[in-house]
Amino acid sequence: MKRIALIAVAALCCISFTLSASPKKPKALTKTVVYQTTLDCEKCAKKIMENVSFEKGVKDLKVDVPTKQVTVTFDSAKTDTLALRKSINKLGYKARVIAFE
């Protein structure tokens, strides 16, 4: 009787460990895009930093005023270059992709 109970407990433990193991999610692909924009000053850069950095999937954002470039590192599973460009355009600045990795 003890042997049957012990086997039943062992079987339940194995089943619970098997069911609780979740499949591994694939790693997100991090991409970087550089936009040439029409920003002019530090105030423009601050506006872009405050808004685009909160877009879904954005990991890192750099704005360079002298070259008028915005560099965005993002999770390609959550957003794309078109959505990011639209978020910059929505702020009143034109943007075009000049580099994409």
Image: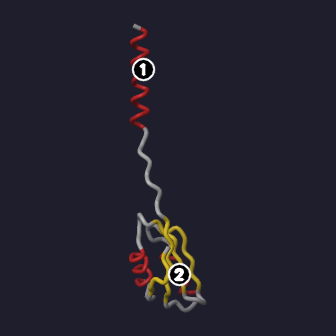
The residue shown at (52%, 89%) is 39
Measured from the top left, where is residue 55 in percent x and y? 45, 71
Choose between 64 and 46: the one closer to the eye.
64
* Upstream in sequence: badge 1 or badge 2: 1
Mark 1 in CB contact with mark 2 (< 8 angstroms): no
The residue shown at (41%, 31%) is 16
The residue shown at (42%, 37%) is 20
The residue shown at (43%, 15%) is 6
> How many residues crowd around disc 2 within 10 Å: few (fewer than 14), some, or many (20 or more)?
many
Q: Give, as a three-letter code, the residue at label 2.
A: Val
How was the colour assigned to the protein in this rendering?
secondary structure
State the residue position of label 2: 70
Q: Quadrant of residue 79?
A: bottom left
State the residue position of label 1: 9
Q: Residue furthest top?
A: 1
Q: Is residue 41 left or right of residue 77?
A: right
Measured from the top left, where is residue 21 in percent x and y? 43, 39
Q: Give, as a three-letter code, the residue at label 1.
A: Val
Residue 14 sits above or below residue 41 on the image: above
Measured from the top left, where is residue 101 in percent x and y? 50, 73
> How many residues crowd around disc 1 within 10 Å: few (fewer than 14), some, or many (20 or more)?
few
Q: Quadrant of the N terminus?
A: top left
Helix, strand or loop at mark 1? helix
Gap between marks 1 and 2 measured at Cα: 59 Å
Measured from the top left, where is residue 45 in percent x and y? 55, 84
Count the labels in the image: 2
Helix, strand or loop at mark 2? strand
Residue 86 sits above or below residue 29 on the image: below
Query: Which of the numbered marks, if any, corresponds to residue 99?
Result: none
